[in-house]
Amino acid sequence: MALQSLLEQYNGILAEADRLLNEVQASEKALRKYDTRLLTAVGLAYGKDSSEYEMAGGTREGK
């Protein structure tokens, strides 16, 4: 009976870890989308060959 209880606890912890992993991955995806939009906006405002674009994380076209 003790083994069954341990297995149930273990499986519950794995299920929770999987749920948290899904949340982390969804948050990372949302952050990547935001980062892409921000970089696009900086590129439109200052140009893709600007220092501002490079400071925002982009690679200047002239380099």
Image (cartoon, rainbow, N blue to C red):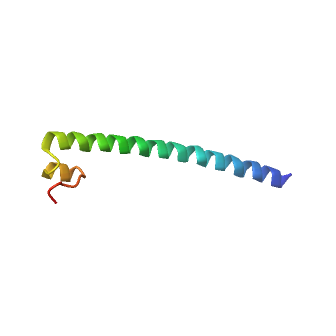
The picture places residue 39, in percent across and down from the top left corner, at: 25, 44
Q: At 60% from the left edge and 47% from the top edge, which residue is drawn?
A: 18
x then y, percent, for residue 60 = 18, 54
47 vs 39, left or right, is left
User: What residue appears at the point 19 percent right and 53 percent down from the top-left corner?
Assistant: 54
Residue 11 in percent (x, y) is at 71, 49
Give whichever of 45, 56 is nearer the camera: 45
Which image quadrant: the C terminus?
A: bottom left
Question: Among all residues in the image, which is located at the extreme right?
Answer: 1
For this orientation, the residue located farthest to the front is 62
Horizontal side of 31 relative to 6 (left or right) equals left
Give x and y (percent) for residue 9. Answer: 72, 49
Q: Residue at the location (69% across, 46% down)? A: 12
Looking at the rendered structure, the number of numbered marks drawn on it comes to 0
> 51 or 15, which lies in front?
51
Q: Is residue 50 left or right of residue 23?
A: left
At horizontal 65% and vertical 46% (from top left) the residue drawn is 15
Q: Is residue 62 above or below residue 48?
A: below
Q: Residue 42 occupies which quadrant of the picture? A: top left
